[in-house]
Image (spheres, rainbow, N blue to C red):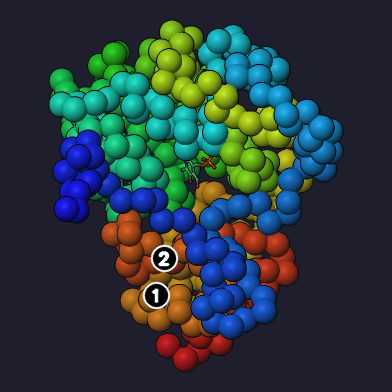
Amino acid sequence: MTIDWMARAVAQTAGLYPYVPGKPVELLLREKGLSHAVKLASNENPYGSSPKAIVAMQQVASEVHRYPDGDANVLKLKLAQFHAVERDQILIGNGSNEVLELVIRSFAGPGDEVIYARRAFIVYALATQAAGAAGIAVPESDGLTHDLDAMAEAVTDKTKVVCIANPNNPTGTLLSNDEIQSFLDRLPRDVIVIVDEAYYDFVAHELGDSVHSLTHPGLVISRTFSKAYGLAGCRVGYAVADAEIVGLVNRFREPFNVNLFAQAAAIAALDDREWVTSKVAETAQERDKLEVALDSMNLLGGHCFGNFVLLRHTKSADILSRLEDQGIIPRPLAGYGMPEYLRISVGSAEENELFLTALEKIAGEL
Ligand SMILES: Cc1ncc(COP(=O)(O)O)c(C=O)c1O
């Protein structure tokens, strides 16, 4: 007799689906019989990571038979100093993805609501569904930018968590801290508000110090080492929040959630601001170059503040498959309800050149 495992799984499983990541290079090579491909689908750092982080990982390799520090104390102290906050205000996660999931799971369950923008980072919806809570996806005012008025109006007494991605992925839009603060001022004091700043380093100049300029009792600001720091493969991210909130969320955290290499790399990377700053500057320069080129081909989908650009065309599916034929992997956004868009991560100068050369040829034939 076959067993109906879906009927045995928790109720919310039926509405869940696995996160769909950018297509791996190996898969495209196999599919197309190519020998070389460029992945511009996951907003990774094309320049690698800080050499200091790599040395730090090599140095801890001989200690890998031991568990890492489950409390990630040295990393917490370093981040506390970096942000001028208390150590106990830092929550460390296996990527900021885990931080988002832990916070949502800690505060929202069946009968509760979590509010986010319809085209915000998809993990908010997935984590909400996994927690058994109801997701309230609020449409953007212009199809791209969080509609903070509508989000504030969506708050009910069931609202436990609100998520804002700033800059947003995949739409690339940025809200000012003043706009976010006005929004926070309209919310009940006991609602958790996650301000997800995975792309913060790319907008540090425009945005300023959000950790110290935003105030709300339930504010959780999350950041990651995956983007500007180039440590996506390590999986390490964190949040800054009220120490009591961090303490509660830590009850849901698995004991050794951030591995030895990730902790060592993040600690070293924080000491290599020079590397991060120079790569952020190069990324911004390359992003602007890509946006100018897309605009000249009438393909620009809007200005993006992260390390990616948006292409918009009614034949985007066609463009996607023809780029893939030439070994370029962009990210389709149909899953976000944006079938006309492709998101392209900013690559190295050489990768961007390959992309633009391929795209110019395709654009001429559309
Ligand atoms: C807006 C946003 N938040 C969070 C994440 C999660 O990143 P990570 O788990 O690598 O820290 C991403 C990854 O793309 C993102 O785009």
- Name which residue lies at 33% across and 59% down: 335
Amino acid at circle 1: Ser
Circle 2 — which element? strand
Task: Judge from the rendering whether residue 210 lies leftward or rightward of residue 127; answer left or right.
Answer: right
Instruction: Give the percent coordinates (x, y) of residue 285.
Output: 68, 57
User: Image quadrant of residue 121?
Assistant: top left
- Residue 129 screen position, x and y as percent: 26, 39
Identify residue type, mark 2.
Pro
Q: Nearer the viewer, mark 1 or mark 2?
A: 2
In-front residue for pair 313/255 = 255
Q: Which residue is mark 2?
A: 332
Which numbered tag is attached to residue 316?
1
Q: Residues within 10 Å of mark 2 (few under 14, many from 20)?
A: many
In the displayed structure, would residue 63 be above or below residue 35? above
C-alpha separation, residue under disc 1 versus residue under disc 2: 8 Å
Label 1 residue SS: helix
Q: Residue at x 29, y 13 (%)?
A: 189
Choose the circle earlier in sequence order: 1 or 2: 1
Q: Position of residue 218 (x, y in %)?
A: 37, 17
Instruction: Write down the quadrant of residue 152 in the picture.
Output: top left
Residue 72 vs 269, above or below: the answer is above
Q: Is residue 273 shown above or below 239?
A: below
